[in-house]
Image: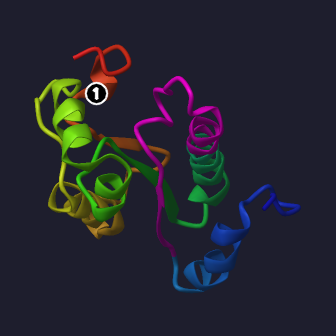
Amino acid sequence: MGVNQQGCFPGMQAVTPTMKKNGGGSIINASSVEGPGGMGSLVAYCGSKWAIRGMTKAASHELARRRIRVNSVHPGMIDTPMTQEHGGAAAMEYGATKVPMRRVGTPADIAPTYVFPASDESSYITGAEIAVDGGVTATHAFGG
């Protein structure tokens, strides 16, 4: 994937014509706590999440005049089938010890975070990063 001549990521490029025609809208990019923070042994993953941050901020400037808001959500460790498959209950228990709130998040913790930036109530918010991570990015790299 790359950027088009206007500098906008192709996925966002696909939705912007309709949004422009409709007078605006909201794009919410899914990232990770590893975007703002980073973690050893995850260079490629962290790099891709960092790229989502930059892409979001650049697109927020590019599309704001068209009344299209662009924000990103950065979940922390979330108990999902994927994380269970890769680490199991032991990883969830260990992960919880590294989160200031001392628990791993759930999909129910994340889902509402996408609703607000998609709503008209967020009409003056663009280029924002929303961390839903139990306080991880408020500390030093899962410093607990």
Vertical order, 24 against 116 (above or below)? below
Q: Residues within 10 Å of mark 1 (few under 14, many from 20)?
A: many
User: Which residue, as the protein is rendered here, is positioned at the far left?
Assistant: 102
Horizontal side of 24 relative to 83 (left or right) equals right
Scheme by which the image is coloured: rainbow
Q: Residue at x 52, y 79 (%)?
A: 23
- Residue stretch in magenta: 24-50
Residue 49 lies in the magenta stretch: yes
Q: Residue at x 29, y 14 (%)?
A: 143
Vertical order, 77 against 121 (above or below)? above
Quarter of the figure that contains the C terminus: top left
Count of marks placed on residues: 1
Residue 1: percent from the left, percent from the top?
78, 62
User: Which residue, as the protein is rendered here, is positioned at the far right?
Assistant: 5
Horizontal side of 93 relative to 18 (left or right) equals left
Q: Residue at x 51, y 73 (%)?
A: 24
> At numbered mark 1, what does the secondary structure look like: helix, strand or loop?
helix
Q: Amino acid at mark 1?
A: Val
Q: In front here: 105 or 115?
A: 105
Residue 5: percent from the left, percent from the top?
88, 61
Q: In front here: 138 or 61?
A: 138
Q: Residue at x 24, y 33 (%)?
A: 95
Query: In the figure, residue 120 lies in which quadrant?
Result: bottom left
Q: In front here: 47 or 117?
A: 47
Q: Which residue is mark 1?
A: 136
Query: In the figure, residue 106 lies in which quadrant?
Result: bottom left
Residue 76: percent from the left, percent from the top?
32, 41
Residue 93 lies in the magenta stretch: no
Residue 132: percent from the left, percent from the top?
27, 43
Q: In front here: 64 or 139?
A: 139
